[in-house]
Amino acid sequence: VSVFVLDQNGKPLDPCSEKRARKLLARGRARVCRLYPFAIRVVDRKLADSGTQPLRLAIDPGSKATGLAIERVGAPTPEGPVMHVVFLMELVHRGAQIRDLLARRAMLRRGRRSRNLRHRAPRFDNRKREEGWLAPSLAHRVETTAAWVERLRRLAPISELAQELVRFDTQKLQNPEIEGVEHQRGTLFGFEAGEYLLAKWGRHCAYCDRGGAPLEKDHIVARSKGGSDRISNLALACRPCNQRKGARDIREFLKDDPARLKRILAQAKAPLRDAAAVNSTRQALLKSLKQTALPVEAGSGGRTKHNRVRLGVPKTHALDAACVGRVGGVENIGIPTFRAKCQGRGSRSRTRLDAFGFPRGYLTREKAVHGFRTGDMVKAVVPTGKKAGAHVGRVAIRARGSFNVQTSAGVVQGVSWRHCVVLARGDGYAYSWAEQDKGGAKSPASINLNQGGAASSPA
Ligand SMILES: [Zn+2]
């Protein structure tokens, strides 16, 4: 693991190894200035004494979690520079919780408004939303990601940014249906085309509408019947459908379902309407990244996947980020991932309600108990009993002084405040480290476009 290093004035220096950080600390040349993520401050060096190496911060924004990777930019290759991974991070969002909380608030307010009023004339709908307005659950994604980019910039001398902006590169696929570029497996074009097909066919099997299962490319007119490898001759099918169809002609395969046949043939010919497949959150993030005045490279999902498969990198959010943009190689991918989960800063409401809106319990007016607040990262060393041992995690306080500690292994309940020490004050995130094999959530639907029976129609 790399350790972030600041100079005596708090300016970021090149990150160093754990071993070197330990030496600096033991000799009294450095102090620990931050635990999450770990950073030290060297007390006898200034940034001006030594330069810094170029570092790239790459971002793969997702709906549930965003991957971030800091990489040292190395030797150039035709595909892009070789990247040496220095820091991997996964930022877990809470859009769904925000949406639910706001829906609940709206419901309660509506109830309060109409409680003693049988009829209220509808008010004139003159509310306008600003250009580029995002729902709070989406705005939170953009804001927390941008905030972490700022934080990491204060810890490491980041000189460039990269963000995955679109699923597929429309420049590469300019008139993909018309130009007659033939799809080839394993190439960058193949991956861009794969992402394009997923968007075009709505991530569902064209023959049975099944979603979530791995999808394969299917030749609408079989290769043996003279069908081409053009994108307009490709549909997506699940494996059972693809195998049932085999090398048969689509007209024969779907002779009992003429409506579907007609629909598939029409859809295959029609290019994707919203070809850019613009995602407003990603655009908003790019806009806020551009305000850093650092160069920002906008990558495509097709290229990320191409890099990941070509370089044999496992799929996690953070490692996906490491593969964003022009990348010739990725080194040092085995390091643990730093995980920051958005938790919010607690609620102002002091009354907990049950499902019917009746009070279920009351929270204390004071948010702190014995100097601890819910959300603080603590270390609890329990000397005896069933919970004996050291537990590090996010604390949830109770008025009676018996706390719960949320560790990466699970919740440890009923830990006395006397055994706890605050490591870091709550700042709206819960932190943990995830090893590579467990770390990083897998994407829900594994879509293996470039493996397995992609060429299921015999040539
Ligand atoms: Zn199917």
Image (tube, rainbow, N blue to C red):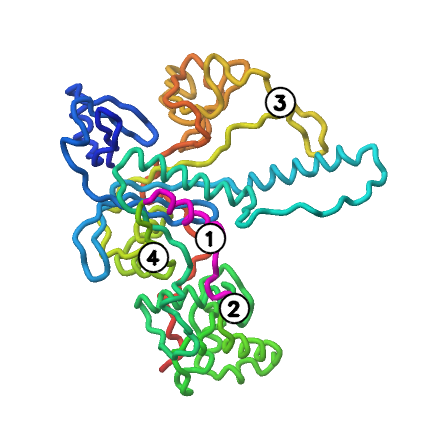
In this view, the residue in front, 280 or 344, is 280
Is 204 rendered above or below residue 130?
below
Dot 4 falls on a residue whose secondary structure is helix
In this view, the residue in front, 336 or 154, is 154
Residue at x 41% of width, y 49% of height: 286
Which residue position holds label 4? 304
Q: Which mark is residue 444?
A: 1
Amino acid bearing label 1: Pro
User: Per the image, is 289 magenta?
Assistant: yes
Q: CA distance from mark 4 to mark 3?
A: 46 Å
Amino acid bearing label 2: Arg
Which residue position holds label 2? 273
Q: Mark 2 or mark 3: name the one nearer the start of the chain.
A: 2
Residue at x 48% of width, y 61% of height: 277
Q: CA distance from mark 1 to mark 4?
A: 18 Å
Which residue position holds label 3? 350
Q: Are marks 2 and 3 in contact (CB under 8 Å)?
A: no
Dot 3 falls on a residue whose secondary structure is loop
Amino acid bearing label 3: Arg
| Residue 82 horizontal side relative to residue 297, left or right | left
- Tag nearer the camera, 2 or 3: 2
Dot 1 falls on a residue whose secondary structure is loop
Please state the horizontal and vertical placement of residue 124, each as a whole percent of the image: 75, 46
Residues in magenta? 274-293
Please state the horizontal and vertical placement of residue 208, each as a whole percent of the image: 55, 69
Residue at x 45% of width, y 52% of height: 283
Please state the horizontal and vertical placement of residue 32, each as a whole percent of the image: 27, 23
Is 80 rendered above or below residue 436?
below
| Residue 232 horizontal side relative to residue 119, left or right | left
